[in-house]
Image: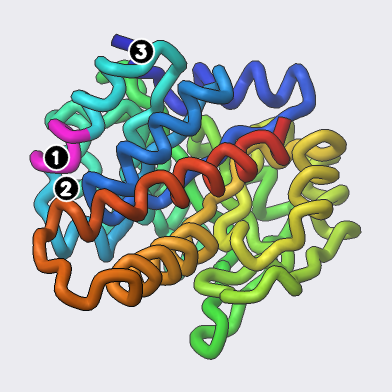
């Protein structure tokens, strides 16, 4: 079994100038494809269950599924709760065997975000689990507007919460379908001078591949969350399967046909960050 905490995979990444892919899972087929990709590349992977996934399938099921995949994989696999909405949800995830939890207090006032994230980080660390927090607000394409991370606030947030990774807002966006995003490098460099906590970029799908690769090698961004890019590939593969055989009806055959496409894409994403 190769379950790992977020800190166990991000600290080497920070020291050796690479990043680890946080791959957003929505079901068995994509999670299995992502674990297979990491195994093929011989590199750690972070399997993430976000709010949409948890609304579709309960936390205990995600925990058991991730646990099973980690047991069958020789590389380190982080079982990560993405965008945890409350202390209680994080507590349940820890009890169910997740090795990393992210609490998203980015919409809260700074003092409240620090207090609650710090409490959750302390709870996680007592259980031998890592904790990611967010400072600033990462917006959504065609949705809520981002609020850029203030470097001074980021330094205080990292120091007072003792989190293992810090998600920041520097131009990245959630649910961006085209890789046309740009980042505020001046803001990133200012944050890096204020704290050595490993940094996380949510909305990694919206960043061009060459930008992701450069940041992985030449910044303290050690984790890129990738979801939309993979979901688009899943949809394309699914439509192609149904177009080839309009009469196919078996769920396992239909969904299973997407795994090769997802594994190939996940391998490319992982390689780009090394």
Determine if residue 119 is in view.
Answer: no
Q: CA distance from mark 3 to mark 1?
A: 21 Å
Tag 3 secondary structure: loop
State the residue position of label 3.
2
CA–CA distance in space, label 2 to label 1: 6 Å
**Residue at horizontal 44%, vertical 70%?**
236
**Most extreme residue toward the right, as rendered?**
186
Residue 194 left/right relative to 261: right
Q: Position of residue 87 (x, y in %)?
A: 23, 48
Q: Position of residue 245 (x, y in %)?
A: 26, 70
Q: How far from the left and from the top, in percent, is residue 104?
A: 40, 56
Residue assigned mark 2: 88
Between tags 3 and 1, which lies in front? 3
Mark 1, other Cα within 10 Å: few <14 / some 14–19 / many ≥20: few
Magenta segment includes 61: yes
Is residue 269 located in the magenta-colored stretch of the structure? Answer: no
First-in-chain label (3 vs 1): 3
Q: Is residue 263 above or below residue 123?
A: below
Determine crowd level at label 3: few under 14, some 14-19, many 20+ residues with C-alpha closer than 10 A. Answer: some
Task: Please state the extent of the stretch shown in magenta in the rendering.
Answer: 60-65
Q: Quadrant of the C terminus?
A: top right
Secondary element type, mark 1: helix
| Residue indicated by mark 1 | 92
């Amino acid at each position: 079994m190769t379950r790992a905490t977020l800190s166990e995979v991000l600290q080497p990444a920070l020291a050796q100038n690479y990043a680890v892919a946080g791959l957003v899972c929505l079901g068995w087929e994509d999670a299995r494809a992502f674990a297979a990709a990491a195994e093929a590349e011989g590199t750690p992977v972070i399997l993430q269950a976000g709010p949409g996934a948890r609304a579709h399938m309960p936390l205990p099921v995600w925990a058991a599924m991730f646990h099973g995949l980690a047991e069958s994989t020789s590389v380190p696999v982080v079982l990560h709760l993405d965008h945890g909405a409350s202390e209680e949800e994080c507590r349940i995830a820890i009890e169910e065997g997740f090795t990393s939890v992210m609490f998203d207090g980015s919409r809260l006032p700074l003092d409240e975000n620090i207090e609650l994230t710090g409490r959750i980080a302390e709870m996680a660390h007592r259980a031998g689990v890592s904790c990611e927090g967010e400072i600033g607000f990462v917006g959504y394409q065609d949705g809520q507007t981002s609020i850029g991370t203030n470097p001074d606030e980021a330094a205080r947030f990292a120091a007072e919460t003792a989190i293992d990774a810090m998600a920041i807002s520097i131009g990245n966006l959630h649910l961006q379908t085209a890789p046309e995003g740009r980042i505020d490098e001046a803001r990133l460099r200012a944050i890096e001078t204020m704290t050595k906590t490993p940094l996380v970029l949510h909305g990694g799908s919206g960043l061009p591949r060459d930008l992701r690769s450069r940041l992985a090698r030449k910044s303290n961004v050690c984790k890129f969350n990738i979801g939309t890019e993979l979901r688009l590939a899943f949809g394309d593969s699914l439509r192609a399967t149904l177009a080839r055989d309009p009469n196919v009806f078996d769920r396992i055959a239909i969904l299973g046909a997407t795994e090769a496409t997802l594994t190939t894409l996940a391998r490319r994403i992982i390689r780009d960050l090394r």
